[in-house]
């Protein structure tokens, strides 16, 4: 079961507004986060098919990679929940943002009352510190990242978004797509359009792939900056600010 989850986590989509640095990928790490919800008695919102219930996590079974949560207060929602193919869970215990999605849950009886059992998520986002603001980079004239693999071969991929924490890279390059989480790209060049270039080390933290509508296999690699010297941080802050200013200028005014 745990091996299956490790494979699934490579293709799971992250929450759209959370930096991939905050993703817990290993089932044992996920179990720890879920147990904190149990011990704290924290309320969790489960959303599915336009419905939601507010509940608590009751038990965590790390051996079988499953957890149990209690039923909501509305009987109709409880009846509908087992038919949902996917559930999204959100909580904010002590200001820590917790978010994850699971496959379908099944109804069970826990300590004599209705409850539900769901499999562990492939990814669980546990945000313990301030998130970095991310901005989409230009699509028509994309920023690019170039460098060399450890064996000396070169690569050049497009940038999808940018923050002070890292970047997301997109490509159809099959070799680049095989790089695993933890792989460090040394001394890569970030070409930032009119703003110039930076050379930094990037660590891959969230590799994933998908198939485009045209049937092409594509890869999105969430990366973090291994280090960010002061001058580089100031330059990136200028880039992010200008990109967001331009985006806001294109938003229609009511």
Image (cartoon, helix red, strand yellow):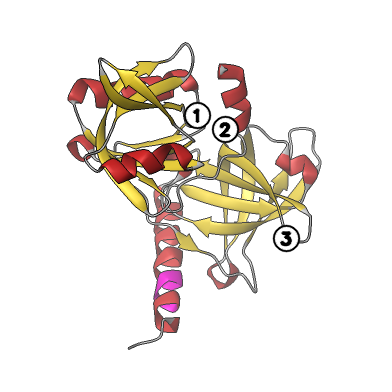
For the image shown, how many numbered marks are present on the structure? 3
Q: Is residue 251 left or right of residue 222?
A: left
**Cα distance, mark 1 to mark 2?**
6 Å
Q: Earlier in the sequence, mark 3 or mark 1?
A: 1
Local secondary structure at mark 2: loop
**Cα distance, mark 3 to mark 2?**
22 Å
Q: Is residue 244 magenta?
A: yes
Q: Earlier in the sequence, mark 3 or mark 2?
A: 2
The disc at residue 9 is 2
User: What residue is disc 3 on?
Assistant: 213
Local secondary structure at mark 3: loop
Q: Is residue 240 left or right of residue 34?
A: right
Q: Earlier in the sequence, mark 1 or mark 2?
A: 2
* Contact between labelled residues 2 and 1, with CB atoms less than 8 Å apart: yes
User: What residue is disc 1 on?
Assistant: 25
Which stretch is magenta?
A: 242-246
Is most of the magenta stretch helix, strand or loop?
Answer: helix
């Amino acid at each position: 079961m745990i091996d299956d989850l490790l494979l699934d986590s490579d293709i799971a989509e992250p929450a759209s507004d959370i930096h991939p640095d905050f993703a817990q990928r290993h089932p044992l790490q996920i179990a720890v986060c879920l147990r904190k919800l149990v011990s704290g008695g924290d309320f969790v919102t489960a959303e599915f098919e336009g419905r939601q219930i507010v509940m608590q996590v009751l038990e965590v079974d790390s051996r079988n990679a499953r957890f149990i949560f209690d039923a909501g207060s509305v009987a109709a929602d409880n009846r509908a929940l087992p038919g949902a193919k996917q559930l999204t869970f959100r909580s904010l215990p002590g200001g820590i943002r917790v978010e994850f999605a699971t496959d379908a849950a099944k109804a069970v009886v826990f300590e004599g009352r209705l409850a539900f059992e769901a499999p562990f998520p492939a990814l669980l986002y546990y945000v313990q510190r301030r998130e970095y603001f991310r901005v989409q980079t230009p699509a028509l004239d994309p920023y690019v990242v170039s460098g060399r693999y450890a064996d000396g071969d070169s690569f050049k991929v497009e940038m999808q978004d940018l923050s002070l924490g890292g970047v997301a890279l997109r490509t159809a390059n099959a070799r680049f797509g095989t790089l695993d989480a933890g792989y460090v790209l040394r001394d890569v060049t970030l070409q930032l359009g009119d703003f110039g270039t930076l050379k930094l080390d990037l660590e891959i933290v969230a590799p994933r792939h998908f198939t485009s509508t045209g049937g092409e296999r594509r890869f999105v690699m969430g990366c973090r900056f291994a280090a960010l010297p002061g001058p580089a941080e100031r330059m990136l802050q200028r880039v992010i600010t200008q990109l967001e200013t331009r985006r806001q200028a294109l938003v229609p005014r009511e």
